[in-house]
């Protein structure tokens, strides 16, 4: 079983290879050689490149969660989320080349993009949690997916932002969160409008099911079965 140090070494080697050769430019044997581990050790720890990517995201999540600013607790939720996402960018900073290569690969490979997206949604749920916002349920799932898309746009700006203060990046994040609030407000209004319709459909389905149960009970009382009727 790979130790924590070995797993970290493998993830580091994975990021170095992605940065240098792109997602499709190396195979697992190359990764084992780069990390200096046996194939059997690599297979047991990380059977696929995607599992390495997930481990990388988990490391970033842990860094952000460990660094939650307690002084932000009384700030509005939007401000807390802004702070958390900026902290995420700080954690990603040492890996800019790998991030750029990952984005290039995702743009060129829709199937890969979908797989990376699924992992990124999990991370963004944790970012909601870090910001003290609801992170479970269908609504939070929609918000997390929206954050994946919004954060990807911010990362595009961040990758080329050479200002130490990241002014362009912060402006882009502000804009994305503003647009997200507008979009979420519209979604909530649509949900409220649709609730009566869904409630009516559920009531109709319940009445239909009850009528079907009554019909089956009647057949049973008559000594017949629905199949023989």
Image (tube, helix red, strand yellow):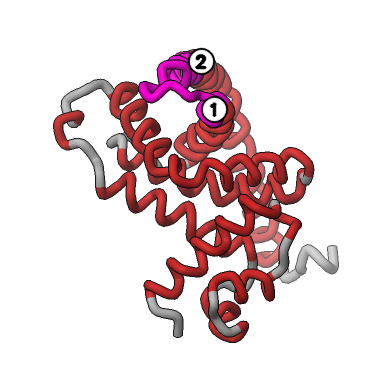
Q: Position of residue 146 (x, y in %)?
A: 54, 31
76 versus 126 height, above or below: above
Residue toward you, 199 or 2: 2
Residue 147 in view of the camera = yes
Kindly identify the residue that appears in the image at 33 percent across and 42 percent down: 129
Q: Is residue 40 left or right of residue 162?
A: right
Residue at x-position 48% and y-position 14% = 175
With 87 as the anchor, is 202 left or right in this view? right
The verdict on residue 164 being magenta is yes
Query: Is 204 a magenta residue?
Result: no
Identify the mark nearer the N-term, 1 or 2. 1
Q: Is residue 169 left or right of residue 128?
A: right
Q: Which residues are magenta?
A: 157-181
Q: Is residue 182 left or right of residue 200?
A: left
Marks 1 and 2 in Cβ contact (< 8 Å): yes
Overall secondary structure of the magenta section: helix
Which label belongs to residue 150? 1
Name the secondary structure under disc 2.
helix
Residue depicted at x 24% and y 41%: 68
Name the mark on residue 179: 2
Give the structural element (helix, strand or loop) at label 1.
Answer: helix
Residue at 16 percent of width and 36 percent of height: 70
Q: Quadrant of residue 156?
A: top right
Q: Position of residue 110 (x, y in %)?
A: 77, 44
In the displayed orientation, state which residue is furthest to the right: 228
Residue 195 seen in this snapshot: no
The picture places residue 79, in percent across and down from the top left corner, at 30, 22
Mark toward the viewer: 1 or 2? 1
Disc 1: CA contacts within 10 A as few (<14), some (14-19) or many (>=20): some
Q: Nearer the viewer, residue 40 or 176?
A: 40
């Amino acid at each position: 079983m790979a130790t924590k140090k070995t797993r970290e070494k493998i993830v580091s080697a994975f990021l170095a290879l992605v940065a240098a050769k792109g997602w499709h430019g190396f195979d697992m044997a190359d990764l084992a050689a780069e990390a200096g581990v046996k194939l059997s050790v690599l297979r047991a720890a990380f059977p696929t490149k995607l599992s390495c990517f997930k481990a990388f995201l988990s490391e970033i999540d842990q860094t952000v969660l460990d660094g939650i600013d307690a002084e932000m607790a009384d700030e509005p939720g939007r401000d807390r989320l802004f702070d958390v996402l900026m902290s995420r960018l700080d954690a990603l900073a040492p890996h800019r080349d790998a991030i750029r290569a990952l984005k290039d690969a995702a743009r060129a490979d829709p199937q890969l993009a979908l797989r990376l997206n699924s992992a990124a949604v999990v991370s963004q749920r944790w970012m909601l949690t870090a910001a003290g916002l609801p992170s479970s349920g269908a609504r939070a799932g929609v918000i997390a997916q929206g954050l994946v898309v919004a954060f990807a746009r911010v990362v595009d700006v961040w990758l080329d932002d050479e200002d130490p203060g990241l002014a362009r990046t912060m402006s882009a994040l502000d804009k994305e969160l503003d647009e997200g609030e507008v979009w979420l407000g519209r979604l909530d209004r649509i949900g409220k409008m649709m609730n009566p319709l869904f409630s009516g459909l559920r009531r109709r389905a319940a009445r239909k099911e009850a009528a079907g149960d009554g019909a089956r009970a009647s057949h049973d009382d008559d000594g017949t079965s629905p199949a023989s009727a």
